[in-house]
Amino acid sequence: MLLWEQVPKLSVESFRPRHGPRREADVNIANERFEAVDKATFRNGMSRLGSAVNVVTTICGGRRFGFTASAVCSVSDTPPTLLVCINRGSSCFRAFEKTRHFGVNTLMPGQEDISDAFGGRTVLQDRFELGEWGCGTTGIPILSNASVSFECEVTNSIDEATHRIFFGRVIEMRENENQAALLYCMRRYLGHP
């Protein structure tokens, strides 16, 4: 175990800007704005951030909608709240924008085909042909054999860059007795028991 005393002490001088040497005037950086890394560098770095593979679902106008997402995380346990990010250019964004409820279905190893279908490799109307789907308390599609499914009520949403972030209060949760999750890291699937 690494002890705090063993961590090297860093000063502001330890950090160098990406472009050019540090100047004396660079020491006061609190109010500086820095350029973002380029898109390719960012996407490559994010590919190393492993995460569970989820299919996010809703129902709107009597039709089922869903997309694959890794941008899902816990916000709070009081009240139980999670967030989901969706690209506003997604084919199903308008449905999610109009609904009050959504489901998060965490996939199991062996459900890579469902992830691929909901990831855009299958047209919207054919995505639910794969997997065993039922209806949740609010009528949204719930994957019967998901590792875990969360049924959520939208409490807030905000736009950031190309995405909308939906916050959902968890109103129902179903766990699979098999404790396993499908993970995605380094641009490939990994099963994790």
Image (cartoon, grey):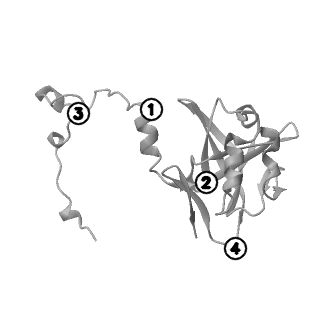
Mark earlier in primary sequence (1, 2): 1
- Separation of marks 1 and 2 at Cα, in angstroms: 22 Å
Amino acid type of the residue that numbered disc 4 sits on in the rendered structure = Glu
Mark positioned earlier in the residue sequence (3 or 4)? 3
Q: CA distance from mark 1 to mark 3?
A: 19 Å
Q: Which residue is mark 4?
A: 177
Residue depicted at 23% across the width and 31% down the height: 29
The residue sitting at 37% across, 32% down in the picture is 37
Task: Judge by depth and name the residue closer to the eye, 172 or 105.
Answer: 105
Q: Which residue is mark 2?
A: 53
Amino acid on which disc 1 is placed: Lys
Q: Nearer the viewer, mark 4 or mark 2?
A: 2
Position in image of residue 19 (x %, y %): 23, 28
For the question of whether residue 13 can be seen, the reply is yes
Disc 2 residue crowd, few under 14, some 14–19, many 20+, Cα 10 Å: many
The numbered mark at residue 17 is 3
Residue 28: image location, x then y, percent: 19, 31
Residue 44 falls left or right of residue 105: left
Can you tell which mark lies on residue 39?
1
> Please, what secondary structure does the residue beneath circle 4 have?
loop
Image location (x, y in percent) of residue 137: 82, 55
* Residue type of the residue flagged with mark 2: Val
Label 1 vs label 3, nearer the camera: 1
Which amino acid is tagged 3? Pro
Instruction: Give the percent coordinates (x, y) of residue 59.
Output: 81, 43
Q: CA distance from mark 1 to mark 4?
A: 40 Å
